Image: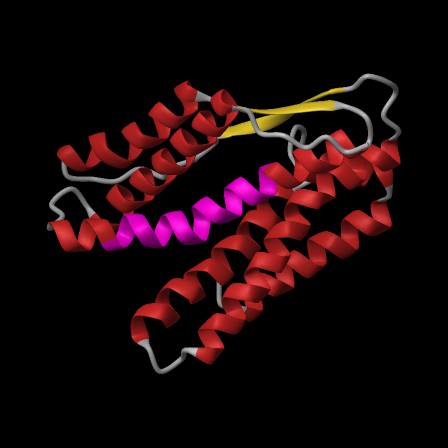
Amino acid sequence: MNNFYVGKDEAWEIAISVLAIALTLTFYVSGLELEPSRFIFNMAAFTITIGSGFVLHELSHKYYGIKYGAKARFKAWPTMLAIALGLAIVPQIFGFRLPIFIAPGAVYIYAMRHISARENGIISLAGPATNWALSAIFFAIALLFSENPVIFTVAYLGAGANMMLATFNLIPIYPLDGSKVLAWDWRIWLASFAFSFFGMQIVGF
């Protein structure tokens, strides 16, 4: 029986992570001198596109982990969130930018029994597969609303960002999802990574 449940503390950590992601990207992309309407728009855009991609990616891992009999919980990484936000803000105070790396947290799987390589691979692939689905939805919205510059811009960002999230997570380096998919079946990993990589080219990322 799949007893999927998100506790209050877990939901709070997810919300904080999404907020930190949106803040980091807003400051990094738009600089430090933001007028209120632009700040609100960017925060909303990054929350809807990348925030949703991150949350649903992690919850997909959680769902399949529980499906296979494990306990699963998202845990935020406050130190990594603070570092990402600091890298987006502090260098700009001194007039330059540094590359940022956002690692908000992860779903921890607590196995109650042995999890096979196949099951672990499916749990891991669930996250990128969710990003594929979101990318397709955002891409369809962008096509449908191509005459509306605001909706088109946000939807196009969502399509590209989610495909990029899938591609990054499928890199076969531990602890990324790709390492576990590769350990399960190299053919499935190769097809998944190729799909993500070429998907990025299609949406222009």
Q: Is residue 108 left or right of residue 51?
A: right
**Residue 201 at what x, y percent from top left?**
56, 66
Would residue 11 be visible to someone looking at this image? yes
**How many circles with numbers are drawn on the protein?**
0
Would residue 76 be visible to someone looking at this image? no
Q: Quadrant of the N terminus?
A: top right
Range shown magenta: 41-58
The residue lying at 68 percent from left, 51 percent from top is: 129
The colour scheme used here is secondary structure
**Residue 198 at what x, y percent from top left?**
63, 64
Q: Compared with residue 37, is residue 5 higher up or lower down, i.e. above or below?
A: above
Q: Check if residue 49 falls in the magenta segment.
A: yes
Q: Check if residue 100 falls in the magenta segment.
A: no
Q: Is residue 27 left or right of residue 159?
A: left
The residue lying at 45 percent from left, 26 percent from top is: 13
The residue lying at 44 percent from left, 66 percent from top is: 156
Q: Is residue 197 left or right of residue 144?
A: right
The residue lying at 14 percent from left, 39 percent from top is: 95
Outermost residue to the bottom: 147
**Residue 56 at what x, y percent from top left?**
57, 44
- Quarter of the image holding residue 60? top right
Classified by dominant secondary structure, the portion drawn in magenta counts as helix
- Quarter of the image holding residue 132? bottom right
**Residue 136 at what x, y percent from top left?**
59, 65
Q: Compared with residue 112, is residue 185 higher up or lower down, i.e. above or below?
A: below
- Quarter of the image holding residue 41? bottom left
Q: Compared with residue 139, is residue 110 higher up or lower down, i.e. above or below?
A: above
